[in-house]
Amino acid sequence: MNSWRPWRLGGLVGSLRFRLLAATLIGLSLAMVLAGVVLNSLFHEHVMRQFEKGLTQQLDQLTARLSFDAQGHPEIDAQSLSDPRWQRPYSGLYWQLDDMTAAPPRPGVLRSRSLWDTRLALPADVLRDGEVHAHELTGPGDSRLRVLERTVRPDAVAGADVRWRLSVAADLNDTHEAVAGFQRVLGFSLAALLVLLLAATWAQVALGLRPLLALQQGLKNLREGRTPRLAGDVPSEVQPLVNDFNSVLDRNDEVVSRARTQAGNLAHALKTPLTVLHQAARNPLGADLATLVREQVQLARRHIDWHLARSRMAASTGMPGQRVPLVPTLQGLVRVMQRVHAERDLAITLEAANEGLQFAGEAQDLQEMLGNVLDNACQWAHSAVHIRVSDGAPPGQSGALATCHVAIEDDGPGMSAEQMPRVLQRGVRLDESVPGNGLGLAIVRELVDLYGGALQLQTPTQGRGLRVTLILPVAAADISVQKDGL
């Protein structure tokens, strides 16, 4: 008794096995009760129909044997009746003839020998010619009787209207016993069927939930380090869950591996500046210490910024369900650049063929990519920067686009074909007089690659300046877009 706790009951009620079995028990119980009521009603109706059919045949036989003499007195030859129960007292089968012309009516003018010295107390009702009424009443020995009655008229009797009531009755005891016996058999049969169905349900639930037990054991083995992935023979309905869980594990392993690689690369990159600083500290008179420290700190900062940017990019990409309005983001960045470069009076224009495009990614990444390219264009432009947004290649499904093109073009000095690949490398700056750390386009290229896009550097058709084209993934075009900007 002391080992039982309320939480055990709560765990039992909350289990999937209990829910399935409880739902099945309730459903089957209701079905069995309904089946029992319906079957019992049908059987009772069938028995009573057969019972009344036999009584009707007896009533027809008596009607055929009923005759009247010249004075209109009724006669029934009892010896001509086929059923011997008419002659046996209180046999359970009776007939009676009542004179309905007299006032009051005279019951039992003629009656079967089985009634002996009793008469049937029939209700005083009015029957039309040929109509049959049915009643239930108490008969000899307090037995329950089913009675059928009809009105009979002589063929030709001088004088007023003459009516007789002929009735037959039979004991319902045997019928009730038959119905009660059927009810007992039916109840036992339905109860046995319910037990068998519950046993089958228990076996079905046990077999159906067995893969979950195997999955639980697989998770335990995974947690304890026995296996690197969920494995085992699971049903096809559970296999997608196992595959998705293994995909999550692969994703986590990839993130951990990338983090370890980034940490190792950062440690390796910082090793050289730290070594130089260490040597300079040991021999401070052999070099310009301030210049050396400034150069090495700047180099270390570049490495740290680079690896932190890559870590943030790797963590944010690949998240499902992200959508960012593309054109409003560009409009906000244009307003920012106009304020930043207000003293240069740059003409920054935006042209969008489809303003409903949605970038399939994270908002900060989109601003990082577009902001770096746009800021670079504004720094090098002489007087104008033009942004053009166009649809890319569709994936073959209506209502959605696979990619879009964002081309940012300036009228600055541009760069040669040999310089274009170099500027995408981290830490490379073509002009050291311009502020920066050489990571802008390199970070943009890394982000674009992580999103499965592309970065293109081209010389515009007029032969001066630089055009940077970002090919980015986009989501469905039917998503509502807020056009308020940033």
Image: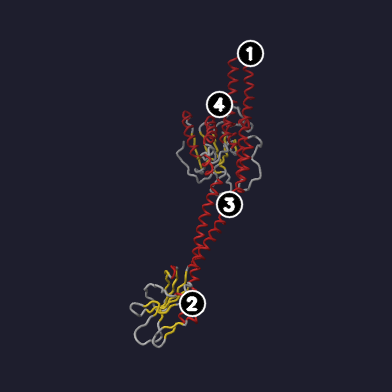
Label 2: how many Cα within 10 Å (few below 14, some 14–19, many 20+): some
- Tell me if 162 is positioned left or right of 352 in this view: left
Q: Please give the residue where the numbered disc 3 appears in the rendered image.
A: 201
Q: How far is the residue under mark 1 from the one under mark 3?
A: 82 Å
Q: How far is the residue under mark 1 from the one under mark 4?
A: 31 Å
Instruction: Give the number of callouts.
Output: 4
Q: Residue at x 54, y 46 (%)?
A: 18
Q: Please give the residue where the numbered disc 4 appears in the rendered image.
A: 436
Label 4: how many Cα within 10 Å (few below 14, some 14–19, many 20+): few
Q: Nearer the viewer, mark 2 or mark 3?
A: 2
- Tell me if 429 is positioned left or right of 383 in this view: right
Q: Please give the residue where the numbered disc 2 appears in the rendered image.
A: 87
Q: Residue at x 53, y 63 (%)?
A: 181
Identify the secondary structure beneath mark 1. helix
- What amino acid is found at the position of numbered circle 2 in the picture? Gln
Identify the secondary structure beneath mark 4. loop
Label 3: how many Cα within 10 Å (few below 14, some 14–19, many 20+): some
In this view of the protein, which residue sits in the foreground, 474 or 459? 474
Q: How far is the residue under mark 2 from the one under mark 3?
A: 59 Å
Q: Nearer the viewer, mark 4 or mark 3?
A: 3
- What amino acid is found at the position of numbered circle 1 in the picture? Arg
Circle nearer the N terminus (1, 3): 3
Circle nearer the N terminus (2, 3): 2
Is the C-beta separation of discs 2 and 4 under 8 Å?
A: no
Splitting the image into 4 quarters, where does residue 192 fall?
A: bottom right
Furthest residue toward left: 103
Residue 284 horizontal/vertical position (percent): 62, 12
Q: Nearer the viewer, mark 2 or mark 4?
A: 2
Q: How far is the residue under mark 4 from the one under mark 3?
A: 72 Å
Q: Please give the residue where the numbered disc 1 appears in the rendered image.
A: 282
- What amino acid is found at the position of numbered circle 4 in the picture? Gly
